[in-house]
Image (cartoon, coloured by chain):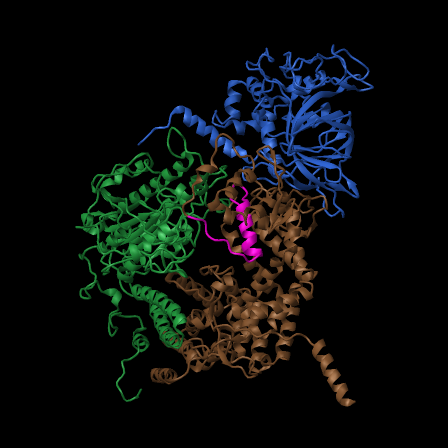
Chain colours: A brown, B green, C blue
Amino acid sequence: MRAVFALLLSFVLLVGCEQPEPPTDGSTPAMRRLSNEQYRNVITDVFGPHITVAGQADSLLRTEGLLALGAQTARITPSGFEKFYSMARSIAQQVVNEQNRSGQFQCEPASITEPDDSCAKQFFSDVGRLLYRRPPTTDELAIPVTAANDSAVSNGNFYAGIALGLAGMLTSPQFLFVIDTTEPDALGLSKWQLTSHAKAARLSFLLWNTTPNKMLLDAAEAGELDTQEGVDAHVDRMMASHRLEAGVRAFFTDFFRFEEFDTLEKDSIIYPAFSAQVIDDSKEQLLLTVLDLLMERKEDYRNLFTTKKTFLTGPLARVYRVPTSRPTGNAWEPYEFSQSDPRAGVLMQVGFAALASHPGRSSPTLRGMAIREAFLCQHIPSPPGDVDFSQFEDPESPDATAKDRLEAHSIEPACAGCHKIMDPIGLGLEQLDGSAQFRTTENETVIDASGELDGIPFEDGAGLGRVMSQNPATTACLANRLTEYALGRPLGAGDRNYMEYLEQKFADTGYRFPDLLRRIATSRALYAVSEPANNAGPLQGAATSATTLAIAESQP
Amino acid sequence: MSILLPRKPPRRQVLRGLLGGGVVSVGLPLLDCFLNDNGTALAATGSPLPVRFGTWYWGMGHTPYNAVAPKAQSGHGIVFLEETKALKPFEDQLNFFSGFGMPLDGRSNYTHFTGWVGNRTGTVPQKQGEIVSPTLDLLVADEIGNRTPFKTIDASSAGLAQENYSARNTESRAEAIISPVELYTRIFGADFVDPNANEFSPDPNIMLEKSVLSAFMEAHQRFISTLGAADRDRMDEYFTSIRQIENRLALQLQKPEPNEACLVPTKPSAPSSKKLTRVREMPNVIETHEVMAQLMAMAVACNQTHVFNLVFTDNFANVRRVGESYTHHLLTHMELIDSELGYQPLAFWFNERCSEAFATYLETLSSIREGDGTLLDNCLIFAASETNYAKLHTIDSIPVYLAGKAGGRMKTGMHIVGGGDPITRVGYTAMQIMGVPLRRWGTKSLQTSRPITEIMI
Amino acid sequence: MPRTPSLRSRLFYLVLFFCTCLVSPFQSYAQKPVDGTLGFVVRDWFTAIYNSRFVDECPEGLAVSNDEIWWRGLSKEDRARLTDNGLRSNLNRYPTAMRRGPNGENVCLNPTVVTDPPMNVVEGRYSYGVNLDGDIDGSATTKNCAHENFTHPDGTPGIDNQMYRLIGCVYGWRKGGLPELIAHERRGTSGLGMILIEVTGVEDARNDDNITVTFYRSIDQFALDGSGRPLPFSSYNIDMDGDGARYGDSLKGAIRNGVLTTVRGDVSLPFYGNYNFMHPVIKDMDLRLEIATEGTTADGLITGYYNVDRFLYYVGGMVGHTSAADSCPAMYRAAHELADGYPDPETGRCTHLSTAFEVSAYAAFIIHPKNNTRQTAR
């Protein structure tokens, strides 16, 4: 009887149990360059918000759909290094100056004109742990400590030497690159995994877009990230923090291709309402809409494409032509488009529709392409080099609307293949001009905003949003992109089972973004590694002793 | 390593002894940057002026039959037509190249990309965005760029920092400086050492800074040696980039040669906030280019760099006129060809401005006297677009100019007709003139080892 | 082959260039009533002044300015004494010229202390405006004083515009004159004296027989585009006074084929110009507004009776009489003589001038603040 009961119990437990996470091939250990945003966040977190970062580094290259993936192949050119060096010097000088230094040091040198190796070592040790995302080695500490010593000896200035040493650390690869270090997987689920420190880094950049803080580093060193419970607890803690917003913003900034805003220009005569303020505000509007819908109200991700709720400033209200009680300045006000207003969903916001347009006109092709590549994760091939454009100019019948002008694209065989999968989507947004203002005619012809997406027709922009929300690729794309963003690598064949599992869970939880994020952050896939890193951790071996010797010799 | 073996004192230790502020050269091994090509004589007053290499870029090519008159065969004399008439005064200071081909060997023509990549690197891309070999300016900079604070300086008046046509590979592409104020600050800012200053004393802080940097570099080198092959390659480049700073610091410790051509310019004023949203309106592009040309020319005259790259309009010509809904690029495709003129008038307007801008650039370089000639006489400028006829994305006969006299090493005033030869012959010739020791350049059908001797002295 | 473009093709491309510039604006952004409301913010406000090409309406010449009257009345010695021997600039003579009262009074603030020669006023046939009093012979009635009528340039007889008659020959008030131009510029950037027009009860923005037009003052400034023009569909909070709006007079009206007209009524309006804040109550006022098809802009006319003393108070307080080239004492007398509306029950003299103002407005959202936290000081 007991045996039967035990059998039944195990059966029930098995069936009722959570489907276990499928294994993945794991990532190849990599070195990922800090993005500009991450660099600034790290400096703020380590040295405080009053330290300003002057200038910025070269941008990362968007690779396979994400800037985050460009980080692992990013290189540093001479002019690129110059920028890092200049930023580092400026930061270091601010850190040691008279106003700031007391807040940055746990110790004071015995005399500021004399060397004080122990205070220098303490400073570099504390700061180095946060900058390198692990305790610096003896070797790594020796160099900046010696610099401080040299400076005090020759110039009579302890702090100037600290600044030089700190600048050197801020331009070291150990700081500029988040480096995957590996160790054998103690649990034996995969052969290799990231070390605790590397796990802490990955978690912290995913959830907060910044370097692991002391609490997380302490937890890593105490082995807390080696157990599922430990990881879960820290993920929950970090997701409950207000700092999660920075991480979510960073992901969607990458997802929505916000770097295109940096070079966005609209013609000031054709679109007089589109000022520089509108450009900044439209970016923020998209993010506020996303944060509100996905994180605050925890709605279904697909609602992003149909939502009427958003936030506006005075300048934006003028572009949308809706009332606001705060017309001047840039205070944000929640706004809901009325049912009779044709706008719905993020695709009809300025931050998408005006971004995917020309400076002086709309573009169904650019919009269709952006929707395919950014929201559906589908790649559009490059245009052929040998296009004959003569058929696009027919003086006998000037083409009144974009739909007319693009008809030739769908007829000409060389063009149709790609344009068929872009133009019919973008045409749904044609009632939004190049600045995303609403219009019903173009060249005195009524605009027909009907189109289709993968065979499903729609009547207008709001209809396109509805069709997008029902397209299975929409949610799959988000799950894929978020996973790639977290792992820092493109997905491969070996990840298929894991992605199916993830997408299923995403659906089961009603496509709630925080749940997806949590699942990825707590999954083994995040730390699984396919091979050991060649740089098996901090500097080791003969080199260390030689350097130590050199330091010993150089002591007076 | 035994501690009993004699060891050379590390640089740091030597410098420490001198940090009381004194003579620089004692005990320090001479760095390469102080030597000329032969590794013998130090650069000194009276030695030949350095030959510099610059590139200039404009988008959307030429209007066929309206830019430079075609020629049956190479020879003296360039016939500038309506579009390029601004260049006529500079005929005897440049050479024009037409009729050179860009064979693709079956690869696609990635519009507005393949053209410049093939021309500047010798290898056409196999996929969108791919650059597999360094552009010619970097090959030249590897030869002559080690004796100046900057190996190259890259700027663009089109306001798109990433659209710069100097790259080692896909991921390693220098960003262009897009703000005249930043260009000024970079060159003539706090780290600038005026060669004509009356007094010079090496700054002990710089000596210390260099010593610290060197110490870190040694550590970085050890770190890099522990990496896997792919990462090591990236970090090697990072290391080379640090060397450039080390180089600059070393130069700041040495008294620079006085140079009468060098006059520190005034700092340009910051643009109004309105202008910042109209960067790619043509009048602003033209104005920015003028200021950048002057800054660039003076940077070169002051020997801050020997290799300099300037972009006028980008390869997708995202520039426009206010009130006009089409950019230059869109006009080349959408504008009707005027039946009487035989070309697209609005697109033609932009092409004309490009020629004028190039003329402005040459004017700026030749307005600086250097030695018994001008700065332009001591330069070789490689100017090209990414297409010939933008409307059809043609990459045959992409127009290229080589301007300047390269310190007397190049003949000018010639129109060279390629007869279908690979366009890499032009870049290869330029590199030969600049002394890059390459026996051949380019891959597949673009490979060449035949310089255009007609223009070489 | 080098070809020079022919004149015809140059012209064609010039036209094409401008057409491509204009292409985009040819898009319909039809203003739909939001909750049955259309809103406008007034940008241009100019007194309707008819100027003929050769100044035929001023047969005696333009009105003589204050400075000239002052100068004529000075002896040679006084001229030298009061102008630093002729070296003082016109601008710096102005304060002295103003204080030409027998005891040094400012004659604009005290216009009856001197007697200037009679002002040159308009004697021409034509004027903009409307027939306010209903008759075409200009005879006196219970509500009006006898006065001459004008004919509208489009031929309509019986036009009442005594304001034009009064100031139409003053140099500064004629077209392009500085006082109104400067006031216009200043209103554009200061946010002062901004009139909001709210049209409620609108079902069809082009045709509606029963609408209400209410006038408010805005406390938000114009939002301007890069060329300094107001952006349409901006939002403006109305000026509140306690729990209610500070202005808020209404007129019933109708819209026919996009032309809005109202019945007549007394309306208080905010006004600011030339450093003067005014709250004129225009009696028997009406509004006629032609709304552009896409609803972005509207142009029209406000007509009614303007209080003489209020107008003289405005003129008296103006800065810049040198550029206006008017004379306050002369205008004071002429204004009271020319007034044609609302006779004083005791003196029988009319107290108001018939007038017309040309207005232009931009589509706007008029915001009624939910909590009264924002008010202007004056």
Residue C357 higher or lower than B323, as above or below = above
Residue A358, magenta (yes or no): yes
Residue B71 percent across, percent down from the top left: 24, 39
Say which quarter of the image contains residue B441: bottom left
> Magenta residues, as a range?
A356-384
Q: Is residue C32 left or right of residue B411?
A: right
The residue at 70%/47% (across/down) is: A337
Q: Is residue B358 left or right of residue A311?
A: left
The answer to whether residue A240 shows anywhere in this view is yes
Say which quarter of the image contains residue B67: top left
- The quarter of the rendered structure image containing the N terminus of chain B is bottom left
Residue C166 higher or lower than A485, as above or below = above
Residue B47, magenta (yes or no): no
Residue A398 higher or lower than C145, as above or below = below
Instruction: Depth check: give the residue in front, B209 or C144.
Output: B209
Residue A486 percent across, percent down from the top left: 55, 68
Residue A139 percent across, percent down from the top left: 41, 81
Instruction: Depth check: give the residue in front, B14 or B246.
Output: B246
Residue A208 percent across, percent down from the top left: 58, 67
The residue at 63%/56% (across/down) is: A471
